[in-house]
Each structure stands twice: as structure tokens, then as C-alpha cells.
Image: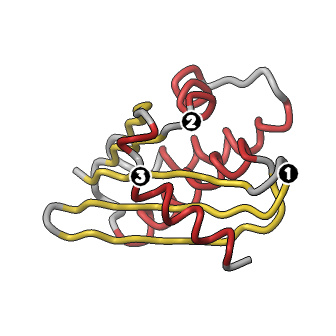
Amino acid sequence: MLEVYVDGSSKGDPGPSGVGIYIKNGKDHHTYSIPIGITSNHEAEFTALIKALEICKEMFPEEIISVRSDSKLVVDCIEHSSTKQDRFLPLLREAEQLGNHFPFFFIKWIPDKQNKKADELARAAIHAN
């Protein structure tokens, strides 16, 4: 099972944004810091999940994926397969489609302090914009 930590960060809302992804695969670790242009913070959080699932689909297509995010909005949307804000619906549906490629896909909310590595990667990506 892969542990996948994701975070999105935005300097301004909207503003320059980036995503951080930290994948633990046993003793192996993979890190990604990806600038994503100008978005809102919530869009950056969804994009972090989507990018992580795209990476996992390419590199680990047969693995069980356990995602950890400090975004309650994203976790709640995935868990309930719905969003009250129409602008997030395409992002939600894309994340769900990607999640369906894995034998099992879980998502769990974690506090910020448990997501420091992904947060650092997301903040670094903002400066790479």
C-alpha cells in the first residue's frame, strides 16, 4: 500500500499556486513539487490530489492508494462524492475517475502538522512559477 501525502498552496486566493506530493512506498520515497499557475487555494488542493493520482496511475497502477490530505474540503468532497460549489465539480469527477483505476483508493484527513513534507513541496512550487 502506498501512503500518498498531498498539499496545495496558493500565494493569494487566487494567486500563484503549487502542489506538493510525497509518496511513501515501503522504504522508498518519491517527492514532487509542481507549479500550477494562478488558482485558488481549494483548486490547488484538488489539483494536488489529481496530480498525485496521475503519478500513481503511471508508476504504481496495481497498488492500493491511501491518500492523506489536510484539506477537509477535498476529503469531504471525495468521501461524499459531492460538492456544494459547482466550480469544484469537474475537479471532483476527475479525481474520482483517477481513483477508480486502483484496486482500492482511500483518502483521509490529517492535521497540517502531519503533512509538513507535502506542504514544503507545495510552497517550493509556488516560487518556481
C-alpha gap between disc 2 and disc 3: 13 Å
- Toward the viewer: 127 or 2? 127
> Residue at the left extreme?
27
C-alpha gap between disc 1 and disc 2: 16 Å
Q: Which residue is drawn at the image coordinates 57% and 70% (left, top)?
A: 124
Q: Which residue is drawn at the image coordinates 57% and 24% (left, top)?
A: 76
Quadrant housing residue 23:
bottom left
> Residue at the bottom extreme?
128
Instruction: Indicate the amino acid at tag 1.
Output: Pro
Image location of residue 100, percent across then percent down? 48, 44
Q: Which residue is mark 2?
A: 71
Picture layout, residue 70 above or below residue 77? below
| Left or right: 35 in relation to 15 | left
Image location of residue 110, percent across then percent down? 40, 34
Q: Of marks 1 and 2, which one's residue comes earlier in the chain?
A: 1
Instruction: Indicate the amino acid at tag 3.
Output: Lys
Asked if the residues shown at circle 1 and circle 2 are in contact, with their CB atoms under 8 angstroms apart, the answer is: no
